[in-house]
Image (tube, rainbow, N blue to C red):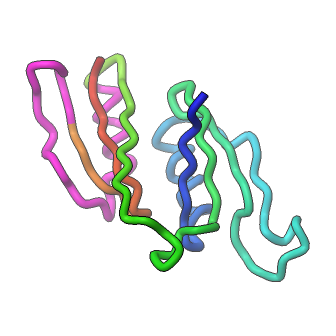
């Protein structure tokens, strides 16, 4: 099993809220740093299901100086163009478009972008 783990730099709680709305899901585990006895704000560990895939999130390692330059792109397959468009609209604010929304030979609708939290997404209709 491979589980995507998204690292933020103090914006994990905000990202969880935005992703819950966009993907119509709920984080089923959210543990704050303070619950571990830390004086720091932020999320130590969180988990949610995005389209049935377990995704972990936290505020650890989101700083560029403890990070690698490895590019990771999370691909989400949608059953319909409307569902893709609705989710993209919920995440679009503050994002950077990598590939405009378009039809491709292998997908009815496709868009690739980096959201306001620095996570790169590729949305496709299966």
Quarter occupied by the N terminus: top right
In the visual, does 21 lie left or right of 121?
A: right
Rendered residue at 22%/40% (across/down): 111
The residue at the point 64 percent across, 40 percent down is: 48
Query: Who is closer to the viewer here, 103 or 38?
Result: 38
State yes or no: residue 25 in magenta: no
Q: Does 95 lie within the magenta span?
A: yes
Could you say where residue 33 lies in the image, as x and y percent from the top left?
79, 69
Closer to us: 56 or 30: 56
Query: Who's the residue at 33% across and 59% down the image?
Result: 93
The answer to which quarter of the image holds residue 107 is top left
Judging depth in this view, the residue of 32 and 80 nearest the camera is 32
Instruction: Tell me where residue 32 appears, x and y as whole percent.
Output: 78, 64
The quarter in which the C terminus is drawn is top left
Q: Vertically, is 18 above or below 68?
A: above
Residue under the image location 59 percent in, 62 percent down: 12
x, y percent for residue 101: 15, 39
Query: Relative to 9, does residue 27 appear above or below in the rendering?
Result: above
Q: Quadrant of residue 105?
A: top left
- Is residue 26 depicted above or below 98 in this figure? above
Q: Which residues are magenta?
A: 82-110
């Amino acid at each position: 099993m491979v589980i995507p783990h998204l690292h933020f730099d103090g914006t994990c709680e905000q990202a969880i809220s935005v992703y819950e709305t966009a993907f119509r899901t709920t984080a089923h585990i959210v543990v704050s740093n303070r619950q571990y006895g830390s004086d720091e704000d932020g999320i130590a560990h969180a988990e949610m299901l995005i389209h049935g895939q377990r995704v972990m999130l936290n505020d650890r390692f989101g700083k560029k100086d403890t990070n690698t330059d490895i590019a990771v792109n999370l691909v989400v397959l949608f059953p319909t163009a409307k569902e893709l468009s609705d989710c993209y609209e919920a995440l679009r604010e503050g994002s950077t478009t990598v590939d405009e929304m378009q039809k491709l030979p292998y997908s009815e609708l496709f868009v690739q972008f980096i959201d306001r939290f620095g996570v790169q997404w590729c949305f496709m209709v299966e």
